[in-house]
Amino acid sequence: MARPKLPISATILVKNAQDTLQECLDSLQEFDEIILLDNGSSDDTLTIAREFNAIYGNLVIHTSEFIGFGALKNLAVSYARNDWILSIDSDEVLESTTLVRLKELFGTLDSKDLDSKTSESSALDSKNPKTPQTPTPPPNTLYALPRKNLYNGEWIKACGWYPDFVTRVFHKDYTRFNDNIVHESIMLPKDARLVRLDSGLKHYAYDNITHLLQKLQTYSSLWAEQNTHKSASPLKAIVRGGWSFVRNYFFKKGFLYGYKGFVISVCNALGVFFKYMKLYEATLPKKPRSCSLIITTYNQKERLALVLDSVRELAVLPTEVLIADDGSTEDTKALVESYARDFPCKLGHIWHEDRGFRLSAIRNAAIREAKGEYIIIIDGDMILHPFFVADHLAFATPKVFLQGSRVIVDSHTSESMLQARSEENAYKRVFTLGGLKARRCKILSHLVYATSRVDSKFFAQKDFIKGIRGCNMSFFKADCEAINGFNESFIGWGREDSEFVARFLFNGGALRRLKFAGIAYHIYHPENTRDMLESNHQIYLETIHTKAKFCRYGLKDL
């Protein structure tokens, strides 16, 4: 006569578990149902499962891509036909005394079980009341099983590995696993009755140090992905990792297990260190992998030549340099072509017909052509410090408009430099000018950046942000595209940069200042005519009034 099956569905997640799955399944022979959810095994895992089912007929195989351990375990439970669930991992084995105890709790104990049952197997943890001998425990009862964690075959009772109670038996209509990607657990409602059994699972935790390090890397990466809402820093990683070693090796007696205790304590500490460092790196602002330097110009080939000379000597070159030409004559094109022959990076020339001052339009044309993730825009009369691009990229942050500053070169120095432009390194004459403002200082530049944030709330008190200049600015191309670029409604000089920044802020961005870094030297020239300033200012005020995020005429006509 067949022995009664335990009315519990055992659920198992598997991926390449051929080394431990057979013993795990053998311990579950007397369960009414086994749900095996495969996550893309490429070894003999599924062969073992099918052969087991051919003998015992109680195993059902399902498949799923990885969606997080919590979600996968809930998915496996959803396939179960029984109300009661045992969740077990493929590297765990249900001990025979635990099987007898579960059969006793669920009313399927028979004479053979009674013969093998020991007094120890029916004893509960002394801190918990005895579980009533009823065929169907109340749904709010959950059972926690102690795990015997093995390292290279040895049961380790130190390093926080024992007692290691895991809640694994529960009623599927009463509770479920949380949705954690890793370190998932069964949720405990307020009226839950948690019973700790005195026998549980044998767990083949780690075969050797290689196995331990592999799992350490996997789980620390998943933990960092899951906990992006938490704060992390290198200091926190070092302190918490160091304390983990001290706690596990000394206070939790890892030293009693020789080299194994030392290896486990070190790896536990590394796991803590790596998960916080991975979280720290994951929460750092995205840095661009490519950069386009756009240089605007109009019939200033002598100044442009000096600027290109300074670009040649940059410590960090942009991916490409694009000359945004607002209608210059052929001599500017010839100059660009001559430089392009041996320029250290790609040098392109974007030109449109001269129909007056159309700076926004030529900037948009260059941005459309740009291949870089990050855009730096300067005027064609700005000589660049060797670390100009490096500094912009160091502070580059998504949703941040970076406003650089300039060092004004006096008219005398500008004129003498232009006259000597054919001399090698003539542009370097400006590097001795500017005083403190022209000195790179990492501490001061970070201080200015951290304290200069401006967002759209600014416009609740004032309608104009001072110091917005297109001669030295940068942003992610995607953020520019999100607001449709520069507003081509502007004709003539004035306010096109301020209006761009306003829409940038209304779209959820922020303005930050770049000083004592990203230094550029402005070659002197007479100021542009301001004939159109008043009408341009009205366009700007309309953007402020409507809190516009887009412009009608920009990168794309809306």
Image (cartoon, grey):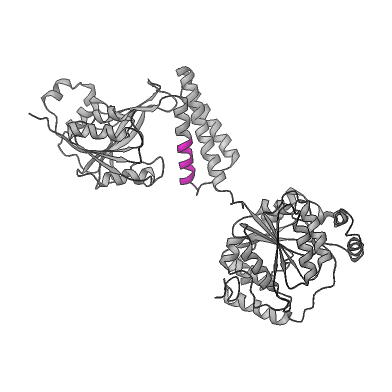
Q: Which quarter of the image is occupied by the N terminus?
A: top left
User: Does residue 443 appear to the left or right of 154 in the view shown?
Assistant: right
Q: Main secondary structure of the magenta part?
A: helix
Asked whether the viewer can see residue 515, the reply is: yes
Does 405 appear above or below 88? below
Q: Nearer the viewer, residue 205 or 137?
A: 205
Q: Nearer the viewer, residue 285 or 174?
A: 285
Q: Residue at x 28, y 27 (%)?
A: 23
Asked whether the viewer can see residue 464, the reply is: no
Q: Nearer the viewer, residue 31 or 201?
A: 31
Residue 300 location, x and y as percent?
81, 68
Q: Residue at x 31, y 46 (%)?
A: 74
Residue 473: name its quadrant.
Answer: bottom right
Residue 101 location, x and y as percent?
21, 29
Residue 440 location, x and y as percent?
78, 51
Magenta residues (range): 217-231
Does 96 appear above or below 398? above
Residue 223: say if magenta: yes
- Numbered circles on residues, count: 0
Residue 86 location, x and y as percent?
26, 37
Q: Which quarter of the image is occupied by the C terminus?
A: bottom right
Q: Residue at x 62, y 79 (%)?
A: 542
Residue 428: say if magenta: no
Residue 337: name its quadrant.
Answer: bottom right
